[in-house]
Amino acid sequence: MTEISWLRGGGQTGRSISAFDWKSSALGEPEHWPVPFRTSLNIALHSPSPVLLVWGGARNIFYNDAFAACIGRQHPGVFGARLIDVPFWPEIRAAHLAAIEACFAGRAQTLKEQHADAIDAWFDLSYVPVFSADGASVEGVLCTCSDLTEHRRGMQALLSSESRLTAIFNQASVCFSELDLQGNYLRVNDALCRMLGRSEEALLQMTLADVTHPDDVPANMSMFNRCIENGKSFTLEKRYLRPDGSSFWVSSNISRIVDAQGRPQAMMAVSTDITERRRAEEALRELNDTLEQRVAEEILERSRAEAVLSQMQKMEAVGQLTGGVAHDFNNVLQIIGGNLQLMQSSPELEERSRHRVKIAIDAVDRGAKLASQLLAFARRQPLQPRSINLARILRNMDDLLRRAVGDTVEISTAIASDLWNTMIDPNQVENLIINTAINARDAMQNGGRLTLQIGNVELSDPDFLSQADLAPGDYVELSISDNGCGMPPEVRERAFEPFFTTKKEGEGSGLGLSMAYGFVKQSKGHISIQSEVGSGTTIRIYFPRSHEDEAAIEERHEMEMLGGSETILVVEDDPGLRLTVTDTLSSLGYRVLTAENGERALAIVRSGVAIDMLFTDVVMPGSVPATELARHARQLLPGVEILFTSGYPRDAIVHEGRLDTGVELLSKPYRISQLARRMRHMLARQGRRPQLAQGGNATQEMPGTATIHVLPVAERQQRLRLLVVEDNIDSQELICELLETLGHEAHGVASGEEAQQALGDQAFDVLFTDVNLPGMSGVDLARNTLSRFPGMSIIFASGYGEMVARNAGFASHSLPKPYDIAQLQDILGKIAAAA
């Protein structure tokens, strides 16, 4: 390698110059190259940018290492070659050569953003002339390349990113906008246009202040300008305006956009509609002005909820307790009371004993009242609500109310002239008024004023409705006030609790107000107490308005106690109570059938025996409930009256605290007079009239099935042997027991084939058969029987009545279903007389 004294380094291309044999070239030895050439070459070789040097008339090319990378594989073959022979950059060759020639002519040149396909690169090219030492001519040209490739790629990536961002900007569901530093809209997306109800064109003519609520503009623009200055983005909740002037709340986050030097260029806003959230927060703020208030109200609400829950738990616990024992307790009271009343009616009872019996009966009444109060408090009493007008109730109670409070208490009433009706149980509301008035009387030891007011109110306050557990709407308000001693807070809070009383032991049960509470709540109303010591007490009661016409209310008067001769089926599982009821009804002249459960009672109903009334306990053991028994009875015995009785009917005939429509209930314990009047009232409304039996009644017990009371016969009938053919086994057994009770002998079978076998085994006087039998019909059985035993008597029991007997073609008796005992006795009497 030849050392060139003036060459200083120059990288690979510098070494190539030193290694080349220049003697044979047109340029000659490097030591003799012109100074401008050597200077320019040193400049080119040491430049960090790509530099091309074109020299002399031959236009030889020299370049540095950086430029070598720009021509790719053509290096180093073209180093020192003539420009005209160099094939690199064919895409810009013409412009490149023209620029070089222009520069040789003394004019500097520039080519911008030139693309070299071979190496996929972009350049800015600057051409400057290199003058001779004397400056008279241009000896060469220096071409400096600025590589734009990475910049261009970055710009392309930026443009692509910008396109994607623009697409996202326009299509995003979040509201985007770009504003200049004065708050003018530069760009808006579709979401913002929809939210503001304005077109893109309209918004681009507006400022941020134009769409902001005037009250929010100062704070918004102050923070906007501060963000321009310090670059700290901010979030502001403010109101935007729609074209119609309506406003809505948004959360707007605004940040600053800067250039490469950090100078503010624009502002970017991201907005979200928070109207619903603000409404919820505003509602919450209205209810809770401070954190302390919110905590206090939460604690208060929780306390109220716990108090309501505690009250409900107490009610439920006592309700379960009373419901569990009320049935048996009232049964016991009914047995005691019924037998005492029967004893009381005995003419042989001496006066002193009669007085004692009366005291015992009064005690039974008090026990019954206690059970009734417990059920009322626990909301388990069966109500019989009707559409009534409280004004009429109050007027009818005037005398009773004045007797209850005494002469020392002045009664004042105020009743609205257009008072609405309300759906409540009239008897229970009377009890409520009396009990409340008595409490008021006791609070006014030295006399005072009792004020009763009734009016129409429309309840809409959400706080009150929530606390009272009422629906908004129309109500009738009953207010009962006194000017007595009043209640301290600790007493007022417990006033509705069961068994709580401030009276001395023995003077009160503590069930008066709790019973009122239970009744009002069961009637879907509300009751509250306002009371202060020394300022008296006011009880306010709200009952829902009824839009039905006012129902008639029966006047109170003593009815004559009548009995009758109808047949009553008594269904009662308690043996002692069953006997008491039987004796009671028998003493009133009724025929009585009894059954200890629903299954036995249903068998009696299906037997075809005529029954005028079903008198059944609601709660009984067994697989046939009282309601199911009643349903079958109505189907099989059209027109039968059904009277339920119970000390606690549970949910069988009572739903939502109300007696089911059309259901008659006589609550235990009841007096004989109550039972007699209810039965006569029900039987009379069906067109029946009491037919009092003459003389005594014959009573016989059939174990496990029924007690039957029948009219006596003048003479003992001849004992008959009857073959009973009935495929219903329960009915078959009942008929056989009934016949034996009447003094006859009975044998039962389930089909005609079994009957033919039995006729061959033993002798019978009468064939008692149903018409419809499995297999052989009752008529065919009777015909075959008469062919074998011509003297046999035939009785057909059928729902078709006498038609079967008339069409049979032979003599027979017809007992139409349902039949009564008297009809059966009459036919058997005729058969016995003819025998």
Image: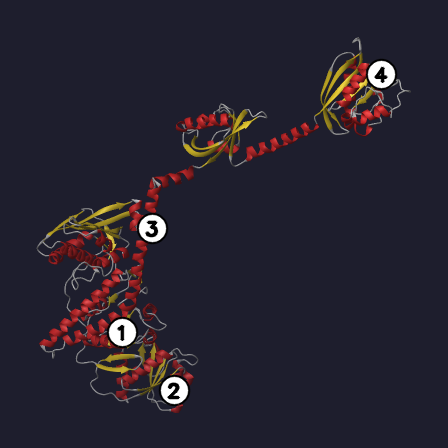
Give the numbered dot on residue 33. Answer: 4
Q: Quadrant of the C terminus?
A: bottom left
CA neighbours of label 2 inside 10 A, class few (<14), some (14 to 19), many (20+)? some
* Nearest-to-viewer mark from 1 and 2: 1
Single out the mark in the foreground, 1 or 3: 3
Residue type highlighted by circle 1 = Val
Q: Is residue 706 above or below residue 48?
A: below
> Mark 1 and mark 2: span between their CA atoms?
38 Å
Q: Disc 2 residue type?
A: Thr
The 10 Å Cα crowd at callout 4, few under 14, some 14 to 19, many 20 or more, is few
- Please report contact status of discs 2 and 3: CB closer than 8 Å, yes or no: no
Q: Which amino acid, mark 3?
A: Arg
Residue highlighted by disc 1? 570
* Pointer 3 residue: 302
Instruction: Count neighbours of disc 3 (C-alpha within 10 A) and say few if under 14, some if 14 to 19, many if 20 or more.
Output: few
Label 1 – label 3 distance at C-alpha: 52 Å
Amino acid marked by disc 4: Trp
Q: Residue placed at 26% from the left, 65% from the top?
A: 664
Return the residue nearer the eye: 135 or 510: 135
